[in-house]
Image: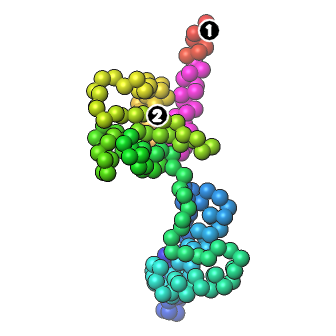
Amino acid sequence: MRRNIKHPDGSSTTTRHVRIELSGKVCTSAERVRDTLLHEACHAAVWVVHGVNDGHGRLWREFVRKANAAFPLLPPVTVRHTYAIDTRFTYRCTGCFATINRHSKSLNLEKKVCGRCHSRFELIVNTKRGGVHPRHVVSSKVDHGEDSTTRPRPPFADFVKEHYKHVRQQTPNHKETMAQLGSMFRSMKIGVNNDNVN
């Protein structure tokens, strides 16, 4: 960010500010944070010193050379990382076993087919411990009957759907809205349980 400051004598000073934001989906260890931060610090240095957004151009590469010389024991700074990104969902082709990784359930299993072999995909939910749970398999023949893996919608999801808009207008952000909804839902459940006891 560039900020121009006007002084009483009519002169002005330009200052440049930088904010580095790291992705929690990429920076999952101290080493990844360190290496990514050094890469981003080189971008920040180009902006602060030269006032340009150079991408991975000549000025950025010059700061990378300086960083690599200053920290010879660290892995060299590179243009792209080679980290395996941990994703919550993996879609695997039932024909050729090609995989697509996603952070959300963004692939429509009823419509999308593999580009290589035109087979259907199955959804695999990855666990934090590295295990996998096959959740939903759609065979090559589409069955429009009721899916046995479909679960009823949780009561809290219905509660959020009904009350979110109203509560969100009274809270500053999504996190606090969800905390408020959780508190309201717990009180409602406690009230229902107390009514059942009497």
Q: Helix, strand, or loop for circle 1?
A: helix
Up the image or down, 59 lies above or below 147; here it is below
Q: Is residue 157 left or right of residue 144?
A: right
Per the picture, the main secondary structure of the magenta-coloured stretch is helix
Work out whether residue 91 or residue 183 is closer to the camera in this orientation and state it: 91
Q: Quadrant of the C terminus?
A: top right
Q: Is residue 128 visible?
A: no
Crowding at mark 2 (Cα within 10 Å: few <14, some 14-19, many 20+): few
Q: Is residue 31 left or right of residue 88?
A: right
**Which residue is labeled 2 in the image?**
135
Residue at (47% x, 40% y) in the render? 124
In this rendering, the label closer to the viewer, 1 or 2:
2
Mark 2 belongs to which amino acid?
Arg
Residue at (55% x, 75% y) in the render? 78
Q: Is residue 143 visible?
A: yes
**Which residue is labeled 1 in the image?**
197
Residue at the top extreme? 198
Residue at (68% x, 74% y) in the render? 74
Please tell me which of labels 1 and 2 falls first in the chain.
2
Query: Within the magenta stretch, is there residue 23?
Result: no
